[in-house]
Amino acid sequence: MIKLKINSSGSLSLPAEIYRPLGGQPLTVISASSAHLLLGRPEQEGAVLISGVLEEGAITDLLSYFNMFRKTGILTIELEGGAKALYFQQGEIVFATSSFLSEDLGEVLFSLGKIERDALRGLRSLVNKTISLGKLLVERGIVTPKDLWLAARSQVENIIYNLFSADSGGFYFQSLPIEQEQILRLSMSTQNIIMEGLRRLDERALYMRKIISLDYFPLETGRDVVDLTQAEARLMNITQSGQQTARDLFRKVGLREYDGMRILFGLIEKRLICMEDTPATEIEGPLGQILGAYNSLFKLVFTQVLKISPQFSQEVAQLLRELPQPYSFVLRDVELQPDGTLDGHRIVANLVGLEEGDKEKLLADSLCEVAFTETMALRRDLDAEQARPLIARVQKVTTEVREMIGRNG
């Protein structure tokens, strides 16, 4: 909060960011005491009806009040680092906005694995007053209209839920009509949102006692896996390597943060997963060398093509699902990493039981197949001058790996 001091002549000097929006019209002293001063324009449309200091637990009382008295207008909540606005119509929350980057629509889509970071950065540079990020995403086929709508609803609900942990700041409520385009149908009533927000606040604290940090690395304990839900099984499938943080795992599976925490907590409670503060060790030997060579190649290709074709990551992910045998055996359940590389620990786990020489050959052939398919995308999306050095790199890596296998054999 900004601290101001009244000088000896009774004047109050306001920072520019405060006095400029107020303009030159007179302000009325609405209330004053030895501890506060409230100025306003009660006669104008959008007048501030309620304002105050935000304390721990105040969000619940505020939302309940506006819901009980069926208020219509905008509740603005000013927090350290940013502000949020909740839109009420007849006491029900119908929309919410936030200035916090982590609650931006693009960040929500990124956290759900719907768009890659580089593609998101590029699209944001094209956003202006007439073209929204959502419109660009749909027009370019990066997300479907349904995905966008679900992400927007998830964004609004998360903006609200994240408020329940706020314990300092300020707020004010303006009585304003809500335009039809500002209304987004939420999945719950305001009363249910309040109960859900309080439940999540308590459960998040419980989950974090076991998870410790979303930047820690979940790792399988090696215990026998039985009776897993579909969501638990999906998370377990990409946890084996211990190379990704909890936050990254949620993104790969397409889980919202709270849902991911709940599932991860359950797996920790079953002693199927433990949390480590550092990633698992790298793969050694010939298999590690083959994986290292191809993953460096995949990362380079991914970086170059993604600048031109934001859908490239989805194409590669689809390719991994459609590989013929024996490549599909080697790469089964292997997830594409955010940088275009493949999960080496998952691949090595798939090769367990084979002779060492067979492992090396199968691995090299499978990764060569992926690299060859990616070169077709290079030729399609890049001009000849851009594609030529990358195609040469693919050929060079493939030759070097085959020579290495020949020497080992």
Image: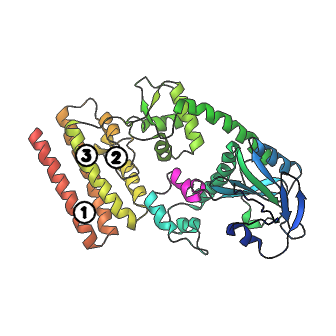
Q: Earlier in the sequence, mark 3 or mark 1?
A: 3
Residue indicated by mark 1: 390
Q: Which residue is drawn at the image coordinates 74% and 45% (left, top)?
A: 193
Q: Which residue is drawn at the image coordinates 46% and 29% (left, top)?
A: 273
From mark 3 to mark 2, how far is it between C-alphas? 10 Å
- The secondary element bearing badge 2 is classed as loop
Quarter of the figure with the N terminus: bottom right
Quarter of the figure with the C terminus: top left
Q: Earlier in the sequence, mark 3 or mark 2?
A: 3
Q: Amino acid at mark 3?
A: Gly
Q: Is residue 120 left or right of residue 185?
A: left
Furthest toward the front, the residue is 8
- Span colored in magenta: 99-115
Q: Which mark is residue 90?
A: none
Q: Earlier in the sequence, mark 2 or mark 1?
A: 2
Q: Position of residue 167 (x, y in %)?
A: 70, 43
